[in-house]
Image (cartoon, rainbow, N blue to C red):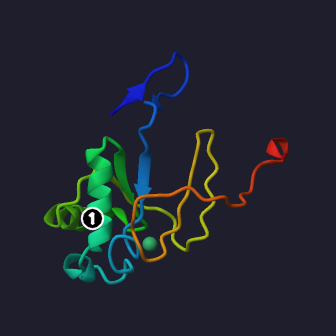
Amino acid sequence: MELEYIEHISPILKDGVKNYLIDIDGTITDDVPNEEPERMVTCEPFPDALETINRWYDEGHQICFFTSRTENLKQITIDWLDKHGFKYHSVLCGKPRGGNYHWIDNHLVRATRYKGKFTDLVEKQVTIEVFKEDEE
Ligand SMILES: [Mg+2]
């Protein structure tokens, strides 16, 4: 992993390298609930997601699939990702279900909502929520 170590604090990624955390169900394939694991074997990847994610991997970014699938579904998930040729570094199960995510972290966090088209990312001005001290 492309990490820079600084004494006494957590390591950070090298400049320009992104830590992509990518949802699975409804984002790179059909929205399959944990209650229907048989569909996790037969669902098809979205081609634009496969192509874009593999390109990000080839460019040197870190690819982690971060999913609400439970640990008992991890191997099915890994087999499916491998079968369809996804390039990635890790799979994290157990993301809370229900959406409306709001991530608070001492590191930089950017978020992009998937709305049916997986492409390279472009910049856009939006309103975000910040802690009061950060207000201008
Ligand atoms: Mg999802």
- In which image quadrant can residue 53 be found? bottom left
- In the figure, is residue 78 to the left or right of 110? left
Farthest left residue?
A: 83
- Residue 12 is situated, as x and y percent measured from the top left of the image, at 48, 31
Q: In which quarter of the image is the N terminus?
A: top left
- Which quadrant would residue 69 be assigned to in this image? bottom left
Residue beneath the point at 20% across and 77% down: 41
| 55 lies left or right of 23 | left
At x 56%, y 55%, the residue is 123
Which residue occupies 46% across, 58% down? 121
Q: Is residue 12 visible?
A: yes
Q: Which amino acid does label 1 sit on?
A: Leu
Nearer to the camera, 31 or 60 = 60
- Helix, strand or loop at mark 1: helix
Q: In this view, does 5 lie above or below 121?
A: above
Give the residue at mark 1.
50
User: Is there any visible trace of residue 89 in the rendered image?
Assistant: no
